[in-house]
Image (cartoon, rainbow, N blue to C red):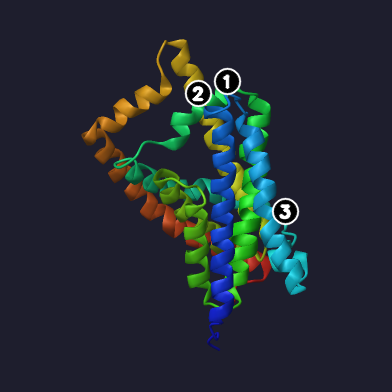
Amino acid sequence: MEKKIDKIEVAKLMLLFLLEIAIELGINTIFGIFTNVLGINVPTYVHVFVLDICLLIPVFAYTIKKGDSIVEAFGFKGIKVATFFQTILLTIVVSPMSMFANILSQFIVPNVMVQSVDQFASESVGLTLVATVISAPIVEEIVCRGFFTNRLNKILPFTAAAIISALMFGALHLNINQFCYATVLGLIFAYTNRASGSVFTSMIMHIVFNGYNMALLFMLNWAMEQVGMDFAETAEVGRANTSSMITSAVVTGVLAVGSFFLTRLILKSIAKREGTIEA
């Protein structure tokens, strides 16, 4: 049966998303004033923790006002142990697709995380990792998949809900580089949750993805420092080498095609195990 599109509800959700963007811009502006105007260097992890709390308030307030169960509305459903490990495998399998989108974006803009690694390394590494690898992924999955995907799926076909929430996820990063690969990942995360019936699967994937990338950034930055090179500058030199970038795009593009078909197989396997194969 085709779902009846509730235009009023769609408009409310779009306004709520604009509020989330406004919150992020506001928090970024406030911390920017602290740093650039007042000369107070606020650590990245403090910025992330404050932002995470502020992003959660609107979606929980909306859900409570609607009178919905928090557990059911956000998809806080347990998953089987085998699904947990299969989800980690899936994170590895989908990596070429996000890498391909990341490389394509770098034909236009630099890699944001590489450009920020010096700042990360100068702060408390432990707290920075807690903020970027645990706190941010959990909050972003609650907001984007737990709230927006699930809420939109009540009034739109799932594919439309997944695409819109993926675009929202990309837009929340407020830069072109992360928008590209975050949108790809957001779409995959949405389908993974549909297969498992739980928001916990996308949380796991997001945590593993961020953890791997942050660890890699720190290790590469450290290795560059040992030989007297600047990681960000070296990355920019590589980005300026068009032939190298094209080669990387072609290689990751081919891998991404294979990754797509493997991803479908794993999602079907998860759905069978969790009893959601019909969906």
Q: Residues within 10 Å of mark 1 (few under 14, many from 20)?
A: few
| Image height of 251 relative to 228, above or below | below
What residue would you read off at disc 3? 81
Mark 2 falls on what kind of element? helix
Where residue 79 appears, x then y in whole percent?
72, 59
Q: Quadrant of residue 235?
A: top left
> Of marks 1 and 3, which one's residue comes earlier in the chain?
3
What residue would you read off at disc 2? 118
| Image height of 122 relative to 116, above or below | above
What residue would you read off at disc 1? 122
How far, Cα to Cα, is label 2 from label 3?
38 Å
Mark 3 falls on what kind of element? helix
Q: Quadrant of residue 154?
A: bottom right
Q: Quadrant of residue 105?
A: top left
How far, Cα to Cα, is label 1 from label 3?
38 Å
**Residue at the spot 70% in from the left edge and 48% down from the top edge:** 53
Is label 1 in contact with label 2 (beta carbons under 8 Å)?
A: yes
**Which numbered disc, 2 or 3, marks the residue closer to the eye?**
2
For badge 2, the amino acid type reads Asp
**Residue at the spot 56% in from the left edge and 61% down from the top edge:** 17
For badge 3, the amino acid type reads Val
Judge whether residue 86 can be spotted in this image: no
109 or 46, which lies in front? Answer: 46
Is label 1 in contact with label 3 (beta carbons under 8 Å)?
A: no
Mark 1 falls on what kind of element? helix
Where residue 38 appears, x then y in whole percent?
58, 26
**Residue at the spot 65% in from the left edge and 37% down from the top edge:** 131
For badge 1, the amino acid type reads Ser
Q: Does residue 1 appear left or right of residue 114 in this picture?
A: right
